[in-house]
């Protein structure tokens, strides 16, 4: 298992992972284009991938412009291996080296993702849209809990 910064040639495999997930699925796979991925990876923020045997099995992307976790997904065949947590920690460590502003994310209600974020210290701050919980992580909270 190797975690590294995402490159443009990873976008194809990132899209495979994004569209393979069982929760927080896109209603239409065309909603997130390769161009969107490229913009968030290289213009708005940064991303990381987890590879196993040269296959991208998980990825995370943070948006510095909107102070938002744009994506954190693990392919269903590789869940339960700690990949999401590793990607999460690398992403937040980098984010808080860039800015001390709070970061937020939205995720669907009653999902494993909701439980994951609660367990690692994210605080619910309301709703995002009609169907998601909005969570926030502050710099001070991250300083206290980061591994």
Image: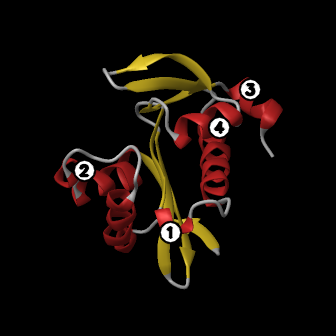
Q: Residue furthest front?
A: 110
Which residue carries the number 2 mark? 32
Q: Secondary structure at mark 4?
A: helix
Q: Earlier in the sequence, mark 3 or mark 2?
A: 2
Residue drawn 82% across and 31% down? 144
Q: Secondary structure at mark 1?
A: helix
Which residue carries the number 1 mark? 77
Which residue carries the number 3 mark? 141
Callout 4 environment at 10 Å: few (<14), some (14 to 19), or many (20+)? some
Which residue carries the number 4 mark? 96
Q: Earlier in the sequence, mark 4 or mark 2?
A: 2
In whole angstroms, how far apart are the C-alphas of marks 3 and 2? 31 Å
In whole angstroms, how far apart are the C-alphas of marks 3 and 1? 32 Å
- Judged by depth in the image, the label closer to the viewer, 4 or 1, is 1
In the rendering, at what x and y percent does residue 4 appear? 58, 68
Up the image or down, 18 lies above or below 24; here it is: below
Q: Earlier in the sequence, mark 2 or mark 1?
A: 2
Colour scheme of the picture: secondary structure
In whole angstroms, how far apart are the C-alphas of marks 2 and 1? 22 Å
Q: Earlier in the sequence, mark 4 or mark 1?
A: 1
Residue closest to the eye, 119 or 41: 119
């Amino acid at each position: 298992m190797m975690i590294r910064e995402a490159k443009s040639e990873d976008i194809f495999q990132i899209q495979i992972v994004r569209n393979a997930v069982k929760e927080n699925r896109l209603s239409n796979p065309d909603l997130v284009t390769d161009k969107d991925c490229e913009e968030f990876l290289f213009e708005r923020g940064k991303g990381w991938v987890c590879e196993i045997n040269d296959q991208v099995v998980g990825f995370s992307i943070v948006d510095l412009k909107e102070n938002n976790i744009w994506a954190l997904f693990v392919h269903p065949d590789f869940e339960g291996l700690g990949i999401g947590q590793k990607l999460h920690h690398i992403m937040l460590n980098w984010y808080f080296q860039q800015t001390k502003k709070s970061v937020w994310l939205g995720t669907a209600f009653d999902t494993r993702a909701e439980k994951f974020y609660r367990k690692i210290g994210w605080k619910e701050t309301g709703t995002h849209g009609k169907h998601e919980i909005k969570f926030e992580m502050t710099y001070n909270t991250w300083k206290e809990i980061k591994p």
